[in-house]
Image: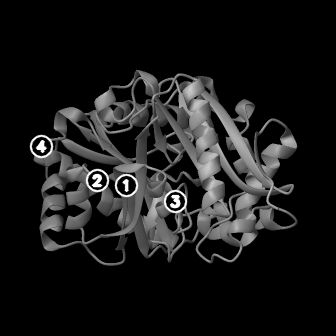
Amino acid sequence: MSDLTITPVITKSERKAFVDLPFRLYKDDPAWVPPLKGEALGLITPEKNGWYSHAKVQLFLARENGRVVGRISAHIDTLALTMPAEQGFGPGVGQWGSMEAEREDVFAALLAKAEGWLREQGMTRALGPISQSVWEEPGLLVQGFDHSPTIMMGHAKPEYQGWIERAGYQQVKQLFTYELDITQEFPPIVKRIIRSGENNPRIVVREVDKRKFEEEAAIILSILNDAWSDNWGFVPLTPPEIKDVGVKLKPIVFNDLIRIAELDGKPVAFMITLPDLNEPLKPLNGSLLPFGWAKLLLWLRKPKVRTMRVPLMGVVKELQASRMASQLAFMMIEYIRVASVQHYGASRGEIGWILDDNQGMRSIAETIDSRVNKVYNIYGRDL
């Protein structure tokens, strides 16, 4: 007889069990990329994750006859509560995420537990899956199960979509990633736009200087907070989070893969590109021992990858409705495309995620002959 129990995660051993579950559920899925267990534990440990400075979180584990069969997180981002309601979050909106379960009935019980906790905290609506911050892994994969996600993107089982929708949730937002062959030159019209920008003395597109990491990060953050401030789900990054991101990403920051565009000497746009760290991580199966650390360190010194991912790009709001916005974007994409192929041996690029209503970025992606390769859904329901 089944004995399903759902309990809050409190101890270190329970957090470890929370992290360990996907390793069993996805062990036969060739597209899944095992995260480093230490990194995954850090994300759910308040002392190691700056996001907890403005969030309240409860993790839950489902056990059946003593065996872990599911997990979920319920959380409230206090900054998200202050955002305009028309941008997706706002007062009374909590989230759930990190959902994994062996069966639909287990998931339904976990979801009910997470929703109950959100109601107890005064929430009137739930969005999910959002695995912690919107800057981490938002959305449920619903298209693109046949290939591995790139760094900082999620994976899931195909059946989860039906489980969520049968639980009464409706899709509120879609996120797209686009892929393209970066060994091929861009269409003639794009090349003409780039040449026009290069002939404009007002425009300078430069590499970042990693030696001035904090200064360059501050410039990018300023553009990001302006460019993304009206986007669905936007929540500004806080100093503790920025510090965490810097520590995590600095090893894979390379000057020629991150560009800042200046107009009349003022920074107005940026593009961040990262070598796909998931490629060297995948064979490590979540551990740097016994020799994984040496392999990873060697790779970081001079990464050679198939895929480059563009997780963030932004143009200040005052230029977003102008032709110059797309011109700056095309220039940055082209310079980074060339560097990716010549210096890192890359052949594939991935842009995203991009919101379904971000017509400007979707148009840019389509103009350079890229195509949607993964789709992620975010769902909502009144509590």
Q: Amino acid at mark 1?
A: Leu
Answer with mark 3 or mark 4, whichever residue precedes in sequence.
3
How many numbered markers are drawn? 4
Q: Which of pointers 4 and 2 lies earlier in the amino acid sequence? A: 4
Question: Which label is found at residue 163?
Answer: 3
Name the element at disc 1: strand
Q: Amino acid at mark 2?
A: Asp
| Position of residue 16 in the picture relative to residue 334 (left or right) | right
Drawn side of residue 20 relative to residue 113, left or right: right
Residue 278 position, x and y percent, is 60, 65
Q: Of circles 3 and 4, which is in front?
A: 3
Depth check, mark 1 against mark 4: the one in front is: 1
Q: Are marks 2 and 1 in contact (CB under 8 Å)?
A: yes
Q: Does 372 sit above or below residue 215?
A: below
Residue sticking out furthest to the front? 1
Q: CA distance from mark 2 to mark 1?
A: 6 Å
State the separation of the CA atoms marked 4 and 2.
20 Å
Q: Which mark is residue 356?
A: 2
Which of the two marks, 1 or 3, is nearer to us in this view?
3
